[in-house]
């Protein structure tokens, strides 16, 4: 059987591995290791914060190694997950279909989404888990004609314990993440090799021969008939560039900013994050306790159970680039204007909830939806393959998205990865 190397085991990589195994002999090369949810009582980092020891977001890696942080010049924090399941393990479990822009360029993923809904349990039936302030925020959004909707979630939420730890890895196995697809792939015979950081694709003529990966300080060549890069919106462009393939400086990240207030007994930190959302043209709004701001932003100096916060997730302009040492990603003037508009809506919601404007405080801008640096266009609608790639090299992650979704991207990435797999299986035939 022909050999396929899949790089990464997040949303895209785990999907491709599951779909391809059996048609190809799949080896998954994963830079990280086995994922374990954050196991410490959150009072431990809270104590470290009080002692002034949490002064830089990058310190989170010491206590929760899957989470990797980079800082942009304008101090925006970029978050990704390195380990089995990639960033999906630290996601909030939101399951939003967002493929309008792909449809516009001729990529119809209806079949793939249908498959996804057969394979991943998705539910918006979690009202019973909402606390009173959340219920009130929902009513206020309705009064303001913002058309809020309960957020569809991936997983078996009838077992959810409302612990609020989704972004730290669900300790109760409720939330779906891509390790489930990875396990299916391995049950079918795929091989998973951890601690293999792929550096470049070895290309001869118009053919990828395999990849070079670093393991315990040594570089090793892994030969393959087919290579699929799914190292995420930051990882894949870096590998492509190392392999002599240019990407577009079109990086988007979906910046997140929270507007918060002290609200005694809100217990938002012990509730499912993002229980409902408001969809606006350039951003979404959703209740969210921002652990990153709570631990590292000095303005977040109230007890966690007494903070009530609304999150803004922005569809940012596709302007940005990444190199080994640096991420160049500044908010454009338009991004800033849109953020300001969103902040004033959040403030109005919190005012109606009973908060005072002078008591409101902002979070740290952070982002965890990178993509867009090898964007699909109408010319690749059939092939899902950028002509600058060798014939047997594919990308199957957020790097392919033509524009920021400003929305949770996991389902859309999975749908695209399924399409990439179908194309590769057809090629083989
Ligand atoms: C806090 C947070 C919450 C989120 N919540 C949601 C949500 O609720 N719903 C949603 O849809 N999205 C959410 N997202 C975004 C979502 O998790 C990511 O957009 C998605 O996982 C990206 O999929 P991907 O396949 O592109 O990359 P990833 O899932 O990041 O996978 C990349 C994989 O490649 C591996 N890798 C990286 N570099 C290398 C290398 N050089 N060699 C080998 N392996 C490598 C990584 O370890 C990882 O396994 C959230 C993100 C964050 C940060
Ligand atoms: S809130 Fe529910 S889904 Fe989230 S970590 Fe806790 S048990 Fe898991």
Image: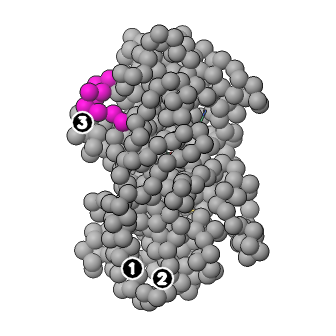
- Of 373 and 309, the residue lying toward us: 373
User: Quadrant of residue 195 in the image?
Assistant: top right
Q: Which residue is drawn at 32% across and 71% down?
A: 341
Q: Name the residue under label 1.
A: 347
In the picture, the quarter occupied by the N terminus is top right
* Contact? badges 2 and 1 (CB < 8 Å): yes
Q: How far apart are marks 3 and 2 (CA)?
A: 42 Å
Residue 173 in sight here: no
User: Quadrant of residue 218 in the image?
Assistant: top right
Tell me if the residue at label 1 has its CB under 8 Å from ligand 1: no
Q: Mark 2 points at which residue?
A: 360
Report whether 140 appears left or right of 76.
Answer: left
* Contact? badges 3 and 2 (CB < 8 Å): no
The image shows residue 343, relative to residue 418, as above or below, that is below
Residue 381 in sight here: yes
Tell me if the residue at label 3 has its CB under 8 Å from ligand 1: no
Magenta: main secondary structure? loop
Q: Residue at x 39, y 85 (%)?
A: 351
Q: Which callout, 2 or 1, points at the residue further toward the start of the chain?
A: 1
- Where residue 173 sits in the image (x, y, percent)? 60, 52
What kind of element bears circle 3? Answer: loop
Instruction: Count how many numbered circles sit on residues in the image.
Output: 3
- Of 42 and 322, the residue lying toward us: 322
- Where residue 227 sits in the image (x, y, percent)? 51, 21
Q: Mark 3 points at which residue?
A: 105
The magenta span reads 375-383
Q: Residue at x 39, y 11 (%)?
A: 429
- Where residue 199 sits in the image (x, y, percent)? 61, 28
What kind of element bears circle 1? Answer: helix
């Amino acid at each position: 059987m022909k050999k396929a190397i899949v790089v990464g085991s997040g949303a895209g990589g785990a999907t491709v591995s599951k779909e391809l195994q059996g048609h190809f002999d799949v080896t998954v090369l994963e830079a990280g290791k086995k994922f374990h949810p954050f196991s410490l009582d959150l009072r431990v980092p809270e104590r470290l914060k009080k002692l002034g020891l949490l002064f830089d977001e990058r310190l989170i890696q010491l206590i929760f190694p899957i989470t990797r942080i980079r800082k942009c010049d304008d101090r925006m924090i970029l978050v990704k997950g390195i380990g089995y399941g990639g960033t999906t393990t630290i996601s909030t479990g939101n399951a939003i279909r967002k493929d309008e822009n792909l449809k516009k360029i001729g990529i119809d993923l209806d079949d793939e989404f249908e498959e996804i809904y057969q394979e991943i349990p998705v539910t918006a039936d979690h009202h019973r888990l909402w606390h009173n302030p959340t219920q009130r925020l929902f009513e206020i959004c309705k009064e303001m004609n913002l058309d809020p909707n309960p957020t569809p979630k991936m997983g078996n939420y009838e077992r959810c314990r409302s612990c609020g730890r989704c972004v730290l890895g669900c300790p109760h196995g409720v939330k779906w993440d891509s390790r489930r697809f990875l396990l299916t792939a391995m049950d079918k015979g795929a091989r998973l090799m951890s601690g293999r950081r792929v550096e470049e694709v070895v290309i001869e003529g118009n053919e990828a021969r395999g990849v070079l990966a670093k393991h315990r300080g040594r570089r090793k060549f892994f030969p393959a008939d087919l290579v699929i890069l799914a190292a995420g919106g930051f990882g894949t462009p870096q590998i492509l560039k190392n392999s002599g393939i240019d990407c577009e400086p079109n990086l988007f990240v979906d910046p997140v900013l929270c507007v918060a207030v002290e609200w005694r007994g809100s217990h938002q930190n012990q509730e499912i994050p993002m229980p409902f959302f408001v969809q606006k043209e350039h951003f979404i709004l959703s209740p969210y306790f921002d652990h990153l701001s709570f631990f590292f932003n000095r303005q977040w100096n109230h007890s966690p159970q007494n903070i009530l916060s609304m999150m803004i997730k922005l569809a940012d302009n596709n302007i940005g680039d990444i190199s080994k040492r640096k991420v160049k990603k500044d908010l454009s003037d338009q991004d800033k204007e849109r953020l300001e508009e969103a902040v004033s809506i959040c403030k109005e919601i919190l005012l109606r909830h009973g908060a005072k404007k002078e008591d409101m405080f902002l979070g740290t801008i952070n982002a965890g939806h990178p993509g867009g640096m090898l964007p699909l266009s109408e010319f690749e609608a059939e092939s899902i393959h950028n002509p600058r790639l060798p014939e047997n090299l594919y990308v199957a992650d957020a790097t392919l998205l033509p524009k920021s979704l400003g929305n949770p991207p996991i389902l859309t990435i999975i749908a695209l990865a399924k399409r990439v797999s179908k194309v590769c299986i057809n090629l083989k035939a």
